[in-house]
Image (spheres, rainbow, N blue to C red):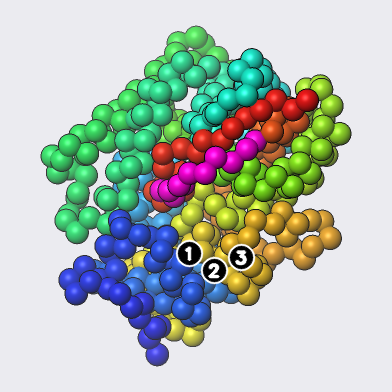
Amino acid sequence: MPAPLMPGGHPLLGHLRFFSDGPLALMRAALDSGEPLVRLKIGRRGGFIVHDPAAIRRILVEAPDVYQKRTRGYAKLKLLLGEGLVTSEGPFWLRQRRIAQPAFKKPRLEVFVQTMDRAAADLVGQWAQGGEQTVDVAEAMNRLALRIAGETLFSADVTGEAKHIGDAMLAVLERFGPLVSAPIPWPEYWPFPANLKMWRGIRTLHGVVDQMIADRRKNGGPGEDLLGLLMGATDPETGEAMTDRQLRDEALTVLLAGHETTANALAFALMLLAQHPQVQDAAAAEAQAALGDGPIDFAAIKRLTYTRQVLLEALRLYPPVWLLARMPMQDDTLCGHPVNRGAFVFVCPFSMHRHPEHFPEPDRFDPTRFAADAPAPDRHVYFPFSRGRRQCLGDRFAELEAVLILGALLRRFRLEWIEQPVTLAPSVTLRPEGGIRLRVTPRA
């Protein structure tokens, strides 16, 4: 029996228009329907939205060779990222994963934490000099995460180019949704002003990374940063190293995944803390007791247990990677319903994290959900970094960075909410469109 059809489709475009007009509302409506699997009208292939842990486990963990990333969305993302770890498939992806994985082992993370601490300390110093002030924390976290990504990836301070890089990235991200949902073939090649802006952004980002790789080659050594580790790494089975094109694809993938996603997660976490003063005070007290006034190292981050709970709950409510798309390479069955080969299958962390059967009062911000004595959520209900073999390679890096930054800011500053509309912009990542302004005051 076919899965229930989601209501509200357009006579001609079906549900495709929701992916440009209101994808979050569509996913939430699918969840609210109570059906574990709903069917969508999307062209000739059709589509499905999944809200069942067992089906999600099959898609992401048990049958990744069946449910592959051969969707229109990933094809458009390749315009920027090429064949990086996020977009590639098959043996090539496995080879790249094996090459890149050592760069995220604990010894390297301990070194990267030192870079994170220096960058966070500089931001603390800037805010302290300004006294009480209003800060767009989305913009501030974007600049901070970009600096950390630049220094850990390239051993380069790219904050001077932050606006240049940020504008280019924004031009690409803003165009992503319309390209995916466009009812015309190859929409990126039509001479629209938004396309021209997107291609300029792609050329800018490719040029920045290509120049850094060329400079590194010219200067004669891979170096100890992430780029150097990638340049010096070889496949343990074949002995092959990455070409410059592969290096660019992976470097841009890490730059997007390690900068854009972390910045957005931090902005939403700070917003939630400002909206919940009691939670903020508890996290601040922990940071002051656990960190004192000294630098923050790998061991100190482990002491920020409540701060980590705050981060995990923020990732539940506002996961930067808000949607995962797959395409089955053969006919299959999910939740007792047939799923046809070539259909679009959507797994949505944003809505799944709000499943009322798994998270009581799902829209309420409550970090105690992730306390040590609380039941751990099902790994296929809560998955901000995905699951299975395609789980984010830098998840530990991102968590360390975010917890460190939250601790560094909370031990020195009080955050106050300023009433404002916060618009969610679901593109490649989930970000706050127009920023988030908070009042920042030094703590006595």
Question: Which amino acid type is shown beneath numbered disc 3?
Answer: Pro
User: What label sits on residue 56 in the rendered view?
Assistant: 2
Q: Quadrant of residue 354?
A: bottom right
Q: Residue 363: x percent and y percent?
A: 59, 62
Question: Which amino acid type is shown beneath numbered disc 2?
Answer: Ile
| Quadrant for the C terminus in the image | top right
Q: Which residues are magenta?
A: 415-425
Relative to 380, say whether 411 is above or below.
above
Relative placement, left or right, of 143 versus 270 is left
Q: Quadrant of residue 439?
A: top right
Question: Which amino acid type is shown beneath numbered disc 1?
Answer: Val
Residue 258 visible, this angle: no
How far is mark 1 from mark 2, CA to CA? 7 Å
How far is mark 3 from mark 2, CA to CA? 19 Å
Nearest the eye: 413 or 324? 413
Mark 3 or mark 1: whose residue is earlier in sequence = 1
Q: Residue 214: x percent and y percent?
A: 41, 17
Mark 1 or mark 2: whose residue is earlier in sequence = 2
Residue sitting at x 62%, y 38%: 416
Q: Which residue is situated farthest in the bottom direction here? A: 1
Task: Read off the residue under disc 1.
Answer: 347
Relative to 380, say whether 125 is above or below.
above
Nearest the eye: 190 or 393? 190
